[in-house]
Image (cartoon, rainbow, N blue to C red):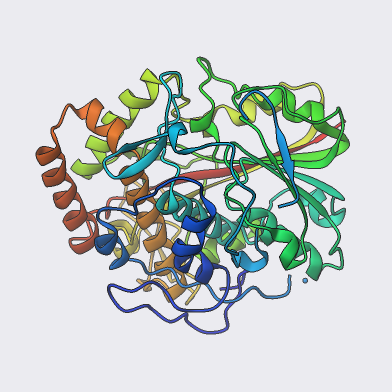
Amino acid sequence: MDSWFNSSSSPPRPPKGTPGRNSGPLTAVVHTTAALQASINAPTTVLRRNAHLASHQSLSISPISNPASASGSTVSTSSSSKATIPQKTKKSRYTSDSYTIRNGRRYIAGPKCSYPLPCDVAELNRQNLRTVLLTTVYGAPFCAPLVSSKPPKTVLDLGCGTGLWSSTCHDYFSRLGHPDVEFTGLDIVPVAPDLKEQGVNWRFVQHDLRRLQLPFPDESFDMVFLKDMSMAMPTGGSEFPIFEEMLRVLKSGGVIEIWESDATIRALLPQPAIPPSTMDRALQQAITTGTYPLVPGTGFSTAQNTYIQDYNAWVSKALEKRMITLLPCTVLSPMMLQEEKLADCGNRRLVVLLGEVRWEREGVGGRPSGSRRPSESSVGSGSKGKYRQTERAALTDEQSALRSTALLTFVQMIESLEPALKEASQKGQDEWDRWWAGMMTNLFEQKGAMSGEGLEVGSWWARKV
């Protein structure tokens, strides 16, 4: 895969029932359950159906190659280069009384806490997998062009989790000759290990992001990064409440970058072929990874899979009840463009399909296949050449692995949201278990996501004037 996570050959596939065993960033992500459990100061229970999930894991990323808190906040110099997660972290201010156990998963307790995702090893692994997935499809741990041409000296990683993104950025900048970039990770619970032990210039600040006054002076950072935090911050409206604080602590000339994904799933329609004259590095990366950029003319339909239709209805009801933005990808561009303090706004939006879809197999649309050059002909007398029919070409191993991982993280998200989804569906435990078993069989064994269902993800960036 011609990307920052590079491989000259097809990655090995793990046998069923075992995690991937290749080296590189994913190794620690899959194999650090014991280390992460030791770093969290509360009892945890891994996925009740983890064996079933593990049997379907198939992403295999090669080693990194050279690129061309409540009321107050606590600070510790406390994660792991190349995702190597040590055994110890600073003791959390959250105790076992701060959590509640639901369906064998640990959630932050409190009647006013609307955060629907758990805080346990399985959820951290899901977040790490999603970070590796997005970094792979983007080709780097960030998308803002200014960051590559002028690396920042200080970076704030909001909602840092295990610190994997900061660790990945450190490795990237080190290969560019900038090993001393200072990273500050901030999160409600200190699960990030000690990145200093891995050579990262790192400190951790424990702080509840729902308390919007960030514990930093004005203009403290050259770059502020936020990833997948829309569920952590109820809005009651269409904007990110943390946005103004991100701008306050960002230096003039600094870069803000936000990664988000929509909660619901749509089905991608056959796409117009991409004219060679418009091909740029981002589009080439999409072709290489088998993803689809959202461009003018991109069409969607409602999800055709009945299990995904169920999920869409339930997650919409659950998030609306908690006043959580259901479609953050639709609000970020207008929010940035309307902000007078920002310039050079840009974005990359992609669809990562959950499997090979029928219209790809039939050779309809501008299929992103990197293995052979397609032959082209018009489709149907009424198409007017809008779509092109191409010679059928199988997905590469890397493309298949990325889609399998996208499907896995989607199913893990359903698992993490189980209490909220079960409440929205009004299903009892037995009914839910039957639905879950049917969904797993449909999506993994029967390849049920063949109608274009995919994750809609994106990166938005801008420079502060």
Whether residue 368 appears in this view of the structure is no
Q: Residue at x 33, y 31 (%)?
A: 315
* Residue farthest bottom in this picture: 9
**Taking 427 as reference, is 46 left or right?**
right
Place of residue 46 in the rendered image (x, y in percent of width and height, measured from the top left):
34, 54
**Taking 147 as reference, is 26 left or right?**
left
Q: Residue at x 87, y 50 (%)?
A: 153
Judge whether 19 appears above or below 158 on screen. Answer: below
Viewer-side residue, 220 vs 260: 220
Judge whether 167 appears above or below 12 on screen. Answer: above
Viewer-side residue, 355 vs 120: 120
Q: Residue at x 16, y 40 (%)?
A: 432
Place of residue 110 in the rendered image (x, y in percent of width and height, measured from the top left):
43, 23
Judge whether 6 appears above or below 73 on screen. Answer: below
Viewer-side residue, 35 vs 330: 35
**Figure quadrant of the N terminus:** bottom right
